[in-house]
Image (cartoon, grey):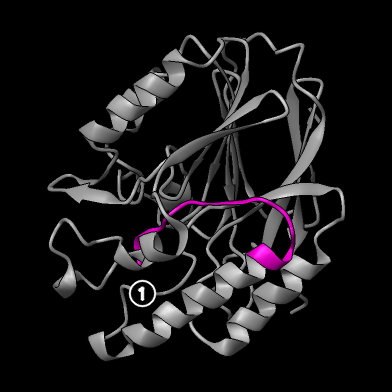
Amino acid sequence: MVKSLKWPICLLVTLVGLTFSTAANAQNFKFAFITDLHVHSDSTLNEVQKLLHTLPKDVEFVVSGGDNVDVDNQSAEKLPAVRSRYAKLKAMLSATSRPYYMAIGNHDRLPAKMRDGANDFQLFEEAFGDTYQSFEHKGAKFIVLNSVYTDSSGYIVPEKQKEWLAKVLNSTPRNMPIVVITHVPFLSVYYPVLEGKYTATDTFTNQKEIMDMFTEHNLQLVLQGHMHLYEEIKVKNVDYITAGAVSGNWWHGAFFGTKPGYLILEMKDGKVTWSYQEAYKL
């Protein structure tokens, strides 16, 4: 598999694993993965709009990796402005005349003092609907998870969502290519590389359980956000890509060498390739 990067500074881990069959009936197409927009002002909305206008014409749809609009760090008095930013972002995505599918990030949640367990995702849901979903495109299955639920152990994919995922997989042919989208990563080497320690912080705690649900399926790729770094980790023939951030270091340039960016991906002959693209000039 050939993957091109504009910058040499990235994290790359490869483990040799198992081989999955490819689906002969998957058609060829391109799509974009944009994550960690962190929209918090008109100027950041304008940068996102510029990015959407410059996507290649052959990109057939857009997938978000979460942290779309900064909510959880806002006061109650500022939430009407936040709601307006969601509406503007939705209008921008609709104006591309492409389908778009949104993951939720931890910063898309209501501020901690306002959450009651039922309304945590209120503003995201008002704009974009369900916080997890699946869809098919030209013979491939895409599964968007909500990995920003929390319990005493940290981020988690809860039981109700696991039951939903089991039903989705039961109805999915085993040779159909699958791409999973999650905000909080399954896997990341952020902490050992940057801080010299191994920790489960900022991965979701039952990731192994969720990963094992795909054992009998043709999981090709997991697209991740949250870390603002570019990482490639390959385990058991599945690629886990932490896809940087459109906002980079939250709209202040590169983040530990990963420039603000996004992915352009191509499904061809049942396999996915990708390239990391610069979101805006620093």
Q: Nearer the viewer, residue 243 or 64?
A: 64
Q: Which residue appears farthest toward the bottom when viewing the image? A: 77
Q: Which residue is mark 1?
A: 71
Side (left or right) of 133 relative to 263:
left
Identify whether 73 is placed above or below 57.
below
Q: Say which quarter of the image contains residue 210.
A: top left
Q: Which residue sits at x=31%, y=24%?
A: 209
Q: Say which quarter of the image contains residue 20.
A: top right
Q: Say which quarter of the image contains residue 198.
A: top left
Q: Which residue sits at x=73%, y=30%?
A: 272
Q: Which residue sits at x=56%, y=57%?
A: 229
In the image, is residue 98 part of the stretch drawn in magenta? yes
Side (left or right) of 118 relative to 185:
left
Q: Nearer the viewer, residue 197 or 169?
A: 169
Q: Point out residue 234 in the picture as x, y percentages from the top left corner.
A: 59, 29
Q: Which residue appears farthest toward the right when viewing the image? A: 57
Q: Which residue sits at x=56%, y=58%?
A: 35
Identify whether 43 is placed above or below 37.
below
SS category of the residue bearing label 1: loop
Quarter of the image with the N terminus in it: top right
In the image, is residue 42 part of the stretch drawn in magenta? no
Q: Point out residue 183 in the picture as x, y percentages from the top left corner.
A: 45, 50
State the extent of the magenta-drawn residues as a range: 94-107
